Amino acid sequence: MSEVGVVRGGHLLTMGPAGDLEDGAVAFAHGEVLAVGPFAEIAGRYPDAAVVGDDRGVVLPGLVNAHTHLSEALLCGMGEDLSLLEWLAAIITPAGRHLTREMARTGAMLKGAELLLSGVTCVNDMFCHTSQGSLASLGAVDGLEAMGLRGVVAFGAEDAVDPLPVADVLAEHHALAERCAASRLIGFRLGVGTVLGQTDELLRASAAEARANGWAVHTHLAEVKEEVVQARLRWGETTVGRAGSVGLLEVPLLAAHCVWVHTDEIVALARAGAAVAHNPVANMILASGVCPVPALRQAGIPVAIGTDGPASNDSQNMLEAVKAAALLQKVARLDPRALTAGDVLAMATVEGARALGLDELIGSLEPGKRADVVRLRGDRPGLANVHDPRQQVVYCASPADVADVWVDGIRRVADGRLVDHDLAALVEASRPLAADLVTRAGLEDFSRLAVRRE
Ligand SMILES: [Zn+2]
């Protein structure tokens, strides 16, 4: 039996130099892409390889979800009538005080399943909590690793609302960095929950720690208008300005949102080589605003797409976030060309990989890169008649069309089902922990789980 695997599709979107191929295939072995090309050519080169797929459907690189919070994995469906700052105060902050490493692991496995089943192979997580001494963020690595996902995990530290000793926060960054260093597929970033959510002492210490250790940083930036106003009142400058003042633009920075940025701030972010994670569904559900995606990209800033957390989307369905990214720009600018299917597919693959500094490894299907591959089936209505594969992946495909997923050459989804896990068991394992978290955090007013437990 050959060690080479081949994935075939009616259309192969390499998102790399080979472009889009009809009846194309990708061959890989030991986790590495060996070749892409027309299926007939690939089959001739690797005649003994096992072939998955046929001359229908679409094969493309695994999607990169550039921003989520697995710390919210057990809190879907709460507070849709709240704006960001209200929602943080009412739900996220109280819950963050009670998260445990076990909740983190179980939640990451549950949402990891949802990610894989929507075609995601790489996820950038910012795990936010103030559960002192729990090292809960390490549980997100445990969970993602158990699911076989590639990713990056940051501890989204904040101490302005819930005071934490700066030394404890830095200790968790180091513990998480060590945990990630021991993981084959999970990397680390230093997390700054929000610039406004940190005391001046922690903000300065975070920037210094990132510079001293050569760590990249992940933060939220300019998400809502109130953030800009509060920052001006506190420091006399916006959060983008403050990030620059404390040195956060001197390290590789991935900033989520950047909805409320002025032209000069876009220029500053571009000059700093910063990247942006755009979260259209979260921006819409929290009524935060419309990210100037075209202007950011025209300035040369890589703009990735994220689902955002399971309590502000509330789904980890990446295909939905990709579609929403195009729709939001079209309607906000009353211009159907504002952001095309090709644009958002690039943002969810090759541009997302660049935003995370992983473009040498993933984001496109080309020889030498890692084999993160998704096959969308062609025997369902969405992709039955493919006139334009890019438009149909973005506007027609749903998780039900995700047939097979490989991460680093290992098949994690086969024929629409998880290979290594029983989905029903993951769901069951999460239920007592979700109920426990609601009770401990006093979120009964937002949850029917608590009512049912009486
Ligand atoms: Zn977020």
Image (cartoon, helix red, strand yellow):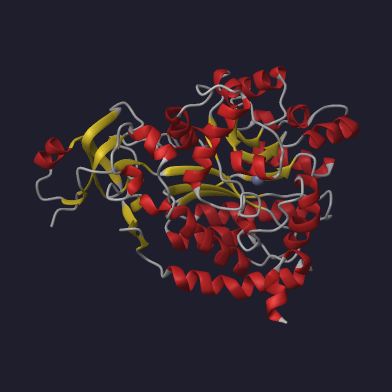
Ligand 1 quadrant in view? top right
Q: Residue furthest bottom?
A: 454
Residue that appears at 43% across and 43% down: 63
User: As displayed, is residue 395 above or below residue 270?
Assistant: below
Residue 362 seen in this snapshot: no
**Position of residue 121 measured from the top left corner of the image (x, y, whole percent):** 43, 48
Residue 452 in percent (x, y) is at 68, 77
Image quarter where the C terminus lies is: bottom right
Q: How many marks?
A: 0
Residue placed farthest to the right in the image?
Answer: 233
User: Considering depth in this image, is 2 or 328 the residue closer to the camera?
Assistant: 328
**In-front residue for pair 195/167:** 195
Quadrant of image for the N terminus: bottom left
Q: Is residue 162 visible?
A: yes
From the top left corner, tell me how far across and down residue 200 is, in percent.
84, 40
Q: Position of residue 43 (x, y in %)?
A: 12, 42
Measuring 34% from the left and 29% from the top, which residue is drawn there? Answer: 16
**Which sits in the foreground, 156 or 51?**
51
- The residue that appears at 32% across and 37% down in the rendered structure is 365
| Position of residue 52 in the picture relative to residue 100 (left or right) | left
